[in-house]
Amino acid sequence: MPRPASSQPTDVELQILRTLWELGPSTVREIHNQMTQAKDIVYATTVKMLLVMLDKGLVKRDESVRPQVYRPANTQKRTQQRMLNDLIQKAYDGSAKSLLVQALSSVQTSKEDLEEIRNLLDEST
């Protein structure tokens, strides 16, 4: 039995969303041109990915204009929050603390970043 489709964006879908967040509402051609600067992909693949993303609710399409214009269904911040919440639930049993401890112990964190984290913690208490 096939597994249910995820509402979370794949890597390629996330690349398309980043393009839309950067450019704003765009045609397939504009999205494709921007994406091919980083990776060689076929135009038909861009079209297909946008249709899949439309079905998943990741993008919206304005069909009242030609060529049709796509835009993200959610802001970058909202999408990041949803992805992070999903990661916390699935990988860290709902514990944001476990995620934070793992993140801080996995990479070298600059003094500036640590200071910003401290300030955020102070503001939230």
Image (cartoon, rainbow, N blue to C red):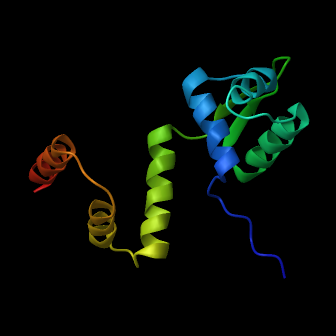
Q: Is residue 47 left or right of residue 61?
A: right
Most distant residue in the top direction: 66
Residue 39 place in picture, x, y as percent: 72, 35
Residue 113 place in picture, x, y as percent: 21, 44
Q: Quadrant of the C terminus?
A: bottom left
User: Is 116 or 9 nearer to us in this picture?
Assistant: 116
Q: In which quarter of the image is the N terminus?
A: bottom right
Does residue 16 lie above or below 94 as drawn? above
Most distant residue in the bottom direction: 1
| Count of numbered circles in the view | 0
Does residue 35 lie above or below 76 as drawn? above
Which residue is pictured at 50% across the width and 56% down the height? Answer: 83
Which residue is pictured at 33% across the width and 63% down the height? Answer: 106
Residue 8 place in picture, x, y as percent: 61, 57
Which residue is pictured at 62% across the width and 30% down the height? Answer: 19
Quarter of the view holding residue 70: top right
Does residue 115 lie above or below 71 as drawn? below
Quarter of the view holding residue 107: bottom left
